Amino acid sequence: VNAAVTALSVRPFGEAGDLEIDFNSDDRPTLATQVLSRCVVASESFWWAQTLGRRISALLRLVVVTNSRATLDLSARCTQPGCENSFEFELPIDRLAPGLADDVVDIPLGDDRRVRLRLPTGADLRDWRARIDPARLDAQQTMLDSLRMEGEIRVADVAAIDECLGKLDPLVDFSIQGPCPACRADMEMPIDLEQLALSSLRVSQRRLLREVHELASRYGWTEAETLAIPQHRRAAYRELIEDSQ
Ligand SMILES: [Zn+2]
């Protein structure tokens, strides 16, 4: 299934219909599914059924294609007392290891116990969002129980299972390690890759709106007329506007 997902064709974010997407929505599972089904050719139900790792991997591929760049610029701040240096770095998004090929994992729990789980999908996130209050103490266990295929999950197992899932599907629970450029102290920086990808696409959407604004206010075209012009020609018109100013 993983190979099938990476073979799907991706088009850059930035067609007229992409302006419909509301990046202010707080329903991230739905937002990510809408973006994916628009730009990575497959239906919404296909994307709901994909594991979180595969959804994130596809979103990152979409960002690379949209920006024509394989890296994203990030900034971080050192947490070492007395240093607190802030610095910028590049994240090579095309070189991140993809998630696990299997959808089902066996996790050993000690005492010869083990549990078999499905990896969570977009549909699981949607389901949890609808029926599990994240503030409840047993929220984590209820979520894991809904993924359980064999074995038993005790309260004491929850943290170990969570850590194990994080290692098996690294894009979901992503962090990078490295020394602070100022004090050389080792840092671990958690990075929410899904959020990062969606933020980058939100910037692309703003850029598209600005383009429409410039061209429509100059030439009197409608939004639809402006967006019907291929991107390279819109860029040429904007250069002409700039030259004439
Ligand atoms: Zn530092």
Image (tube, helix red, strand yellow):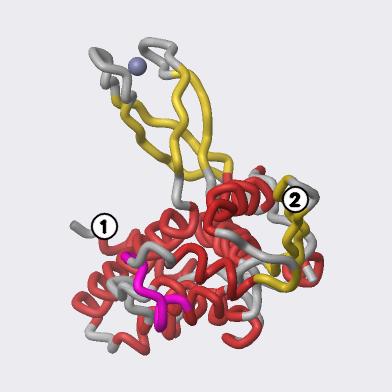
> Mark 1: which amino acid?
Glu
Question: For this rendering, which residue is in front, 137 or 193?
Answer: 137
Number of marks in the rendered image = 2
Residue 25 placement (x, y as % from top left): 31, 75
Quadrant assignment for ligand 1: top left
Instruction: Give residue 21's quadrant in the image.
Output: bottom left
Residue drawn at (36%, 67%) of the image: 134
Image-quadrant location for residue 89 = top left
Q: Amino acid at mark 2?
A: Pro
Judged from the image, the secondary structure of the residue bearing numbered disc 1 is helix
Earlier-in-chain disc, 1 versus 2? 2
Q: Is residue 151 above or below residue 70?
A: below
Q: Check disc 2 and report its element: helix, strand or loop.
A: strand
List x then y, in percent, for residue 135: 31, 65
Q: Viewer-proximal residue, 142 or 214?
A: 142
Whether residue 20 sits left or right of residue 121 in the image: it is left
* Residue 78 in sight from this viewpoint: yes
Tag 2: Cα neighbours inside 10 Å, few (<14), some, or many (≥20)? some
Asked if residue 236 can be seen in this view, the reply is: no
Q: Say whether mark 2 is within 8 Å of ligand 1.
A: no
Q: Is mark 1 within 8 Å of ligand 1?
A: no
Q: Position of residue 126 (x, y in %)?
A: 47, 79
Magenta stretch: residue 40 in it? no
Q: CA distance from mark 1 to mark 2?
A: 63 Å
Tags 1 and 2 in contact by the CB under 8 Å rule? no
Q: Residue at x 55, y 76 (%)?
A: 124
Name the quadrant of the C terminus.
Answer: bottom left
Residue 108's mark? 2
* Relative to 135, 17 lies left or right: right
Residue bounds of the magenta highlight: 128-135
